[in-house]
Amino acid sequence: MAKAKTNYTCSDCGAISSKWTGQCAACLQWNTMLETVGETPGLNRLSNPQPRSLAQTAPVLSLADIEAVDVPRFGTGIEEFDRVLGGGLVPGGVVLIGGDPGIGKSTLLLQALANMSSMKSTLYVSGEESGAQIALRARRLAVEARDLKLQAEIQLEKILGTLADLKPEVAVIDSIQTVYSDALSSAPGSVAQVRECAAQLTRVAKLTGITIILVGHVTKEGALAGPRVLEHIVDTVLYFEGDTQSSFRLVRAIKNRFGAVNELGVFAMTEKGLKGVSNPSALFLSQHDNQVPGSCVMVTQEGTRPLLVEIQALVDTSHLPNARRLSVGLEQNRLAMLLAVLHRHAGIAAFDQDVFINAVGGVKITEPAADLAVLLAINSSMRNKPLPRGLVVFGEVGLAGEIRPAPRGQERLREAAKLGFSIAMIPKSNMPKQKIEGMTIIAVERIDEAFNKLRELD
Ligand code: TYD
Ligand code: MG
């Protein structure tokens, strides 16, 4: 028998090469070429089920001739989940949910399916747990869902068969990495398998109008395992965030063809499963009786929702030739940049200091509006001097030392005022036109000005 031919597939973009290379020739990523078993050419038809010449050509239409219909949506019965989905699930839509193991993906989906099962036909396909295990979890969650259909299956063709027979309206595949297609010889979870199975399931969803939710595992680096193409295939990509130690879980929309991205759903893990937290803005503040040095509260905007998050910094004399810069929940490279700005434009040097920063509560802040809070927290830790009580800040800091505005400044200020913050240091361009009840506003244009105004406060 001829030896099976091996190929090398890029785990990032899915490009195939016959030789191993250190760098992917297509996407230029390093160390992403993984050995995969070569597929026999005939089987590639699977991804291309109809030869092009036989397929019907879709008509070409003018945009004006096409009626724009609102996508019909249906709720999942979990308000916070609907919020990240942009209002609910869409028939024929494919949603991918990623997250660390044990963070609550299966729990959330079982709860959502159970809620929907009274109105819609629902199917839960699990490749990770047996039916008995799922039933046990359902009992623990106290969900009453007699009509929810379960299948413990990992072979794609059989799953497609079930979808065709049962014609559910919503189906969950937990997880896409366990599913394999007989047509491919590579192992389940390999790039080729994940891509092929996701593509097939998506095609079925579009053809039949079944809403399919795929669960995806994440790699150690926190990216969805399998090729990037997975994110391109599906309509919506959601990520679970938060540390498994704390009970809070955030679900963030990364991509959404049917709604806004960066919408955030906030949940608490209880012994009865995940419960939505409808007013989460004070969740990420730690409780100090007295102000402590190195802590600064900022207002971040997640989608349509302002959140107050405490940024903590610790600055300590370094005993290493290269001082350490470590950040949790904030961007590491941005920290190095901000320290350079701090030195050049405010004359505060930290080259011989280890600098650690942390966003409290396992929340990840990607927006640059956290810059001002980071710098104030670092300065406060360096001088071992707490910031004034009731201070809240936001604003992006540029390389020239200028403080740039953040979107939706008014809403941020209002939320902070609602939670009892009384002083706000904000970018000048964010100065609200009307006075905000109970809030003294300090508008600043430059980082050195921010430090000077802070000094005037005490
Ligand atoms: P799970 O949904 O199995 O995670 P994933 O599918 O993302 O891997 O979550 C399991 C975790 O959640 C587990 O550590 C226990 C915890 N948990 C609760 O705290 N309460 C509950 O009611 C349930 C079902 C799970
Ligand atoms: Mg699971």
Image: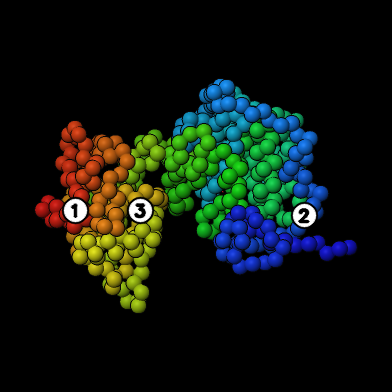
Residue at position x 66%, y 49% from top? 194
Q: What amino acid is labelled 1 in the image?
A: Ala
Q: Which corner quadrant of the image does residue 299 belong to?
A: top left
Q: Is residue 408 visible?
A: yes
Task: Specify whether 259 is left or right of 54.
Answer: left
* Residue behind mark 2: 39
Q: What amino acid is labelled 2 in the image?
A: Glu
Mark 3 surroundings within 10 Å by alpha-carbon count, few (fewer than 14), some (14 through 19), many (20 or more): many
Mark 1 or 3 closer to N-term?
3
Which secondary structure, mark 3? strand
Question: Which disc, if any, is residue 359?
Answer: 3
Mark 3 or 2 closer to N-term?
2
Q: What amino acid is labelled 3 in the image?
A: Ala
Quick one: 426 or 170, which is closer to the camera?
426
The residue carrying mark 1 has its beta carbon less than 8 Å from ligand 1: no
Give the Cα distance between marks 1 and 3: 21 Å
Task: Specify whether 276 is left or right of 40.
Answer: left
Give the Cα distance between marks 1 and 2: 62 Å
- Up the image or down, 65 lies above or below 241; here it is above
Task: Specify whether 33 is left or right of 39.
Answer: left
- Up the image or down, 321 lies above or below 286; here it is below
Q: Residue 384: percent from the left, percent from the top?
A: 20, 63
Q: Which corner quadrant of the image does residue 22 belong to?
A: bottom right
Q: Are marks 1 and 3 in contact (CB under 8 Å)?
A: no
* Residue behind mark 1: 450
Residue at position x 24%, y 65% from top? 343
